[in-house]
Amino acid sequence: MAITAGSLRDWKLPMPGVDADKEVRGHVLIVAGSREMPGALLLAATAALRAGAGKLTIATAASVAPQLGVALPEARVIGLAETADGGLLADGAQSLFKACERASAVLIGPGMQDEAASAALVRALLPHCAHAPLVLDAGAMCLARDGFRFDSPVLLTPHAGELAGLTGGDKEDIAQAPQVAAQRAARNWRAVVALKGAVTVIAEPSGRRWRHEGGNTGLAISGSGDVLAGLIAGLAARGAALEQAAAWGVALHAMAGEQLSLRHGPLGYLAREISGEVPALLRALAAH
């Protein structure tokens, strides 16, 4: 199925009532960042709120947690111990486990370092996230490299190079046949897969697929994927199923790039500017 403005209008997002409080709008937990890449969490968290989530908790490296708490005054902040290589540790982090259990949706991965630590962290958190949609992005996807199969709702967001690294496939072959590659990965992992690219394919293990073409080359910029992951997590926190959150997130991300290109030109706008376009786009899509 093609993802277009028209198909999105027919696939309406869950909308809170006029008297809904922040709890009804959903609580998103984002476990991300590192001392070298704290900005990835900032980008993802801002996007989750712009997508309409009502509450935000972030968990990140203790060395940068205070600064991110100031940059994100809307968030509760949990500081995590770090490995020598900058990875995040869940050892003794009971507050993180409890945050997982309270969350409406969880995003893990943007800006994380130390692959071994990242895989261990995801394994430790999975039992506490089983009730909620889980988005694995960037470094958190490394768990899937060993043929891991998921038992609860999970979305992975690789581009062709990442999928090649996770599956042992060829990047060029994946890029030439993204629908085949995304479907195979979804079945093997028992997860929803959003294979990002000029053409983005979203595949479910059951065989359903969605395809999006759009956006522009300006979106190929550092931090853009972190914004997309945050948008998807924010929409999932509002109550959208992972495949719907992914479809809407991919489309909103592309539409935001188009809006920015009209003002700034095809190149040169920043990932941090993408989220600011989203509320107006959501309003426009809901108005028809």
Image (cartoon, grey):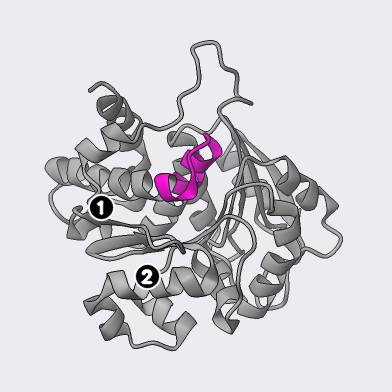
Quick one: label 2 or label 1, which is nearer the N terminus?
1
Foreground residue among 139 and 199 = 199
Q: As displayed, is residue 169 above or below residue 276? A: below
Residue 1, which numbered label?
1
Q: As displayed, is residue 200 above or below residue 102? A: below
Q: In which quarter of the image is residue 170?
A: bottom left
Secondary element type, mark 2: helix
Which quadrant, please, contains the C terminus?
A: top left
Residue type, label 1: Met
Foreground residue among 63 and 184 = 184
Indicate the position of residue 182 as horizontal and vertical percent values.
Answer: 37, 70
Q: Is residue 121 left or right of residue 147?
A: right
Residue type, label 2: Ala
Indicate the position of residue 10 as horizontal and vertical percent values.
Answer: 28, 33
Q: Residues within 10 Å of mark 1 (few under 14, many from 20)?
A: few
The span picked out in magenta is 231-244
Foreground residue among 118 and 176 = 176
